Image (cartoon, rainbow, N blue to C red):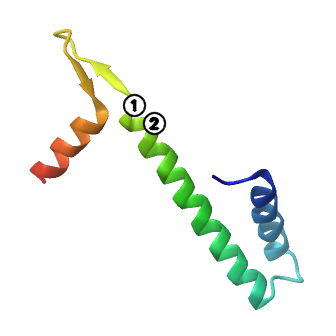
Amino acid sequence: MVTKEQIDRINFLYHKSKSPEGLSMEEKEEQALLRKFYIDSVKVSLKATISNTKVQEPDGKITNLADLYRKNQDEN
């Protein structure tokens, strides 16, 4: 899970990258790592949300979105 401090650091590095000063190589590497960590955290959270979401079909049947996703992946 991403902490507020990490998000603040991502935002700080973004704004610094847009300034005339720019980022050092170390800061660019840190920014890339923080962004990857953030994106991975969002993906995990989204997968957890989807796996716990159910949809009621017009016929009344309840379908778990994770099962629906797996079924569509198998067909493609």
Q: Which mark is residue 71?
A: none
Residue at left 42%, top 45%? Answer: 47
Q: Is residue 57 above or below residue 34?
A: above
Q: Which mark is residue 52?
A: 1
Residue type, label 2: Thr
Residue under label 2, please give it: 49
Given residues 50 and 21, the one toward you in this image is 50
Residue type, label 1: Asn
Q: Residue 13 is drawn in which quadrant?
A: bottom right
Residue at left 89%, top 83%? Answer: 21
Residue at left 84%, top 65%? Answer: 12
Estimate the x, y position of residue 72 in percent, counting from the top left. 17, 44
Q: Is residue 3 above or below residue 52?
A: below
Q: Residues within 10 Å of mark 1 (few under 14, many from 20)?
A: few
Residue at left 63%, top 67%? Answer: 35
Q: Residues within 10 Å of mark 2 (few under 14, many from 20)?
A: few
Q: Secondary structure at mark 1?
A: loop
Q: Secondary structure at mark 2?
A: helix
Q: Are marks 2 and 1 in contact (CB under 8 Å)?
A: yes
* Number of disc labels: 2
Residue ranking furthest to the right: 21
Q: Alpha carbon of mark 2 to alpha carbon of mark 1: how far?
A: 5 Å
Q: Residue 68 is drawn in which quadrant?
A: top left
Q: Is residue 36 found left or right of 14 in the rendered image?
A: left
Residue ranking furthest to the left: 75
Q: Is residue 35 found left or right of 30 in the rendered image?
A: left
Estimate the x, y position of residue 66 in percent, counting from the top left. 29, 38
Q: Residue 34 is drawn in which quadrant?
A: bottom right
Q: Quadrant of the C terminus?
A: bottom left
